[in-house]
Structures are given as structure tokens and as C-alpha cells.
Image: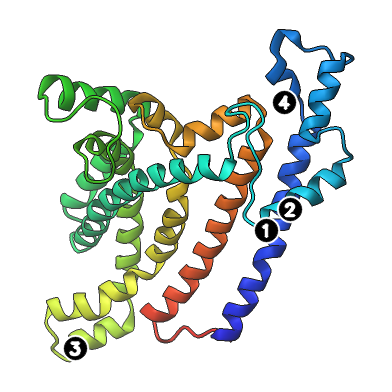
Amino acid sequence: MWKYIARRVLWLPVLLLAVSFVTFALGHYGPGDPVAVMMGARYDPDSAATKNLRRELGLDRPFHVQYVDYVSHFVRGDFGSSLSLHRGQPVRELIIKKMWVSAQLAFAAMLISLAGGLPLGFFIAHRQGRWHDPTTVTITLVLMSVPVMVSVPAMTWLMCLKLSWVSCSGWGGLFDLRIIVPAITMGVPGIAGLTRLMRASTLDVMGQDFIRTAQAKGLGALTIDSRHVLRNAIIPIITVLAFSLAGLIGGAFITETLMGIPGVGRLAVDAIFARDFPIIMAITLIGASAFVLANLLADLAYAVVDPRIRYS
């Protein structure tokens, strides 16, 4: 097990180098120029001011020099400074605060998806062929199909304007009432996918020989469900849960924008339009690291849930 973990961890720098190189190359050779964005109407590629600014930012150096310099600073925890969006401010301070905001929102939404999807999927698997099964799946799919641009204004009108339960916008943290509307609008669509996945996994486990053996031995339905069905049915959910945890820092641009939440999703989109390379690179590399570690966490969780799984 420890050898497997060591191999996976050693692959992390290789994967991050590949991701960083591709992202840096796209930003360097892609259309647009951060200097042009910063100078606006005053931009003139041949003017002394433009050349001085490019030299000050280090953008006049060869590609490989810029890339090596960025990677060497990144491994020391220095993500650079914002070029245009928040000029001069350290990227590390900018994104850590906003990632924490997005993580709290995404965590609340994930809890709603899990609390709704897993019990529903387990329940309708035991009601296969009855009206509960297609009705539940249909309702969850309908809720999933509602776009965020519709659900956010609708929930805001109902809970904020009509019922006056919560404030209409802003952010106060995980335990503030203002998180209710964005968390529901982000979490409810995920219920459908988890319901269908849990239903399929539960049905697959219920058809296995060891379940029929447990029934033949006279074990009660509650014991079989809790000790055998649920524990084995939850294994495919681990992958979804692990990547959901990794996606906590990704942000939700539309929801954050409509609700006035200062998360990393809006920052990432603004940085792309502003050609702010340091912010784009930092968000990309931190996100890639999170997904690689989440994949490793999922593999280790498999061995905990199912003792038959072993890694060498």
C-alpha cells in the first residue's frame, strides 16, 4: 500500500509540470496581450511606454526563461503578482481568500446532493417496478434540467422577496443564512445523478450471490441492507465524492455572479478576459493538484470500504 502511495505522489510533479507547460504555452502564444489590456487605448506596440512596461513585467524574455522562472517561484509558494486585474497584488492572497469562499459554498451544495441523492437511490432500488421508481427519477431529472439562470432568480424571488427568509445577496460564510439559496440551486441538480448512480449500484449488489446467501441464512432485511448492500453499493459513489471534494475550490461563476458571492469562479473568468496569466496559472495548477490528490484519496478509500481491494 505504501509503495503504491509513494508512486502516485511521485507522479504528482510530473503531471503538474505537464499541466503548467500546456497552460503557460496557451497563455503565451494565444491571442491577446496583457500589456494591451493594461494600457487600453494608450497601447502602441512600438512606443517606449509599452516596451518599458513589457520589460518591467518580464514579458520581453524568451518563453523558456519565463516558464522556468515561474515554475521555480511556484514551488516556493510564490504565485507571482496580478498583472492587470488587481495589478501588483500577490496572487496567493487573492485566490486563497476566494477559494475558501467557493469551497464553503460548494461543500454546502455537495451535502445537499448527498443527503438527497444517496437515500433516494437506495430507496427506489428497493422499489424497482413500482411507481416510486420512475416518479422519483423523473422528478430529480426535471429539477436537474432547470438552468441556474432560472433557478437562482426563482429561489431569490421566493425566499428573499416573497417570504423574506434570507437576504437577497451577499456572503457571510458557511453558517450564514445567505448561503441557503446558492447552496440549494447548486446542490439540487446533483441529486439526480447521485440518485441514478446509487440506484444502479444498489441493484447490482442486490443481484449478487452473497446477498442471496445472506437471505438464505435467515438474516433480516435491515442487517443485509446495512452490512452488505449499502457498504458495497457505496463504492462507486466514492469516486464521485472524491472529485466533488476536489471541485470545492473550482467555484461557480454564474451563481457567484448572480448572488454577489466573492468566490474564485468569477475571479477565474475575469482573469481570463483580462489576460492575467499569474492568476490563471495559479488557479489551474491548484485545481490540477486537487484532482490528482482526490484520485489518490478515492483509491485509498476503496481499500477501506472493501477489504478485498489491495494495491501493490
> Cβ–Cβ below 8 Å for labels 1 and 2?
yes
Q: Mark 1 points at which residue?
A: 75
Q: Which amino acid does label 3 sit on?
A: Ala
Q: Which amino acid does label 1 sit on?
A: Val
Count neighbours of disc 2 (C-alpha within 10 A) and say few if under 14, some if 14 to 19, many if 20 or more.
some
**Separation (CA) of disc 3 from disc 4:** 70 Å
Q: Name the residue under label 4.
A: 34
> Which picture quadrant has residue 214?
bottom left
Quadrant of the drawing holding the N terminus: bottom right
Residue shown at the point (48%, 31%) measured from the top left? 266
N-terminal-most mark, 2 or 4? 4
**Separation (CA) of disc 1 from disc 2:** 6 Å
Quadrant of the drawing holding the C terminus: bottom right
- Nearer to me, 302 or 130: 302
Is residue 249 shown above or below 158?
below
**Separation (CA) of disc 1 from disc 3:** 59 Å
Q: What residue type is labelled 4?
A: Pro
**Separation (CA) of disc 2 from disc 4:** 20 Å
Give SS at disc 4. Answer: helix
Give SS at disc 2. Answer: helix
Count neighbours of disc 1 (C-alpha within 10 A) and say few if under 14, some if 14 to 19, many if 20 or more.
few
Residue shown at the point (28%, 55%) measured from the top left? 114
> Cβ–Cβ below 8 Å for labels 2 and 4?
no
N-terminal-most mark, 3 or 4? 4
> Which picture quadrant has residue 279?
top right
Residue at the outermost bottom position? 217
N-terminal-most mark, 4 or 1? 4
Q: Where is residue 3 in the image (x, y as percent from the top left)?
A: 61, 85
As drawn, is 169 to the left or to the right of 48?
left
Q: Which of marks 1 and 3 is in front?
A: 1
Q: Mark 3 points at which residue?
A: 216
**Separation (CA) of disc 4 from disc 1:** 24 Å
